[in-house]
Image (cartoon, rainbow, N blue to C red):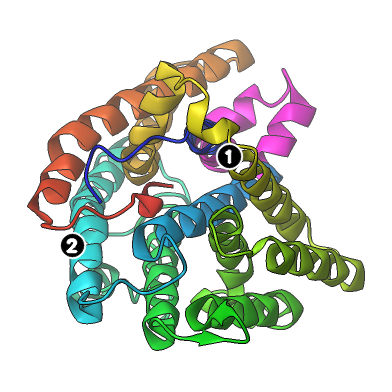
Amino acid sequence: MSGAVQRLPLVDLLKAVAAQLIVWHHLAFYGPLSDSAAPLWPESMAWLSQQARIAVQVFLVVGGFLAARGLAPDGFWVPGRSLPVLLGQRYRRLAGPYVVALLVAVAGSALASRWMTHDSISAPPTPAQLLAHVLLLHDLLGYEALSAGVWYVAIDFQLYALLALLLWLGGRRRFAGLELGVGFVTLLLLASLFHFNLDPDWDVWAVYFFGAYGLGALAWWSARRGGRRPLAALVFLLACIALAIDFRERILVALGTALALAIYQATGWGRHAPTRPLAAFLSRISYGVFLVHFPVCLVVNAAFSRFVSLTPELALLGMVLAWGLSLLAGALFHAHVEQGFAGKARWRLSPSARA
């Protein structure tokens, strides 16, 4: 897609808010600053530490929504598009900035280790561990992550590749009045909701998360021509049944996000609402923030631990500083690294990975 593709204000808002929650989740979960600041707002800090990670579900749904828009906006595979070339471009755009961020994470851990000893600091990587990360196979091969959240980059690529494969297999064929690719996606998202997502042993594979990702794709297709609203309504109902059988808060959040996107598109408001500059900016830099915020937060934690006498108030100030520096680093990373890799792609992909 061209860089001039229309922005969707609700998508920008969802990505902007979810990105901030992920940064604050990691700030609350890792490092000594949160331990020292916890007495000020114990309930809020506990929620950020344990519950704020649910924002990942928003990224999953938005990722599926944007991927469907980019891969098959009307439910059909675009003729002449090469699946291997498409996935190669996707890998370059997704993994190029990610590899640079891995080097930043290694450097951040090395610097932080000079000032503090903490479980959140990674040991220097072995060549095999680094190669596994570059190939997005670290979780599958059982290597320790070099930075918080890198698992998501690998899962995002798996999800995108799986969605593209299903749509490619469906081609431009129909069955019972429904695009075959959309049918394949629907069947796998239901299999995920009713089976794979119930077993945490699958959580290093895309099928575990495909329920949320597929709901996002269906939310996009439900508002397009072709009468898919009954299908979307049926799938959303079946998702509610999956929740009744085994309640999962993550699936509830994913379903709510998908419903909001479907309604947003169907009412037409999504095409005419004004773009909010701050939300659009935070959305654009969200992938950069996601990639570099953890080493930034780690170094700030280490610096405060080494050089500041941590009262709760100063610890909270350190967390706010780490958040602000994460946004600054993410914006610089987006402008000077991420955009460089994006500019090399001949076909500009929808930025689902920036979730």
Amino acid type shown at disc 2: Arg
Judging by the rendered image, the residue that carries numbered circle 1 is: 25
Specify which label sits upstream in the sequence, 1 or 2.
1
The answer to which quarter of the image holds residue 297 is top left
Queried whether the magenta region covers residue 46, the answer comes back as yes
Residue 232 visible (yes or no):
yes
Task: Count neighbours of disc 1 (C-alpha within 10 A) and say few if under 14, some if 14 to 19, many if 20 or more.
Answer: many
Q: Residue at x 52, y 50 (%)?
A: 62
> Which of the 4 quarters of the picture holds residue 308?
top left
- Residue position marked by numbered label 2 in the rendering: 92
The residue closer to the viewer here, 41 or 181, is 181
Say which residue appears at 49% left-offset and 33% top-offset. Answer: 271
Nearer-the-camera pick, 203 or 230: 230
Q: At which x and y percent is residue 202? A: 59, 81
Q: Secondary structure at mark 2?
A: helix
Residue type for callout 1: His
Magenta stretch: helix, strand or loop mostly? helix
Q: Are marks 1 and 2 in contact (CB under 8 Å)?
A: no
Position in image of residue 303 (x %, y %): 36, 26
Decide if residue 155 is on the left or right side of residue 60: left
Mark drawn on residue 60: none
The residue depicted at 41 percent of the width and 33 percent of the height is 283
> Could you say where residue 155 lies in the image, as x and y percent from the top left?
44, 68
Please say whether residue 103 is one of the residues in the magenta stretch.
no
Left or right of 274 on screen, residue 222: right
127 relative to 74, above or below: below
Horizontal side of 222 relative to 289 (left or right) equals right
- The span picked out in magenta is 22-49
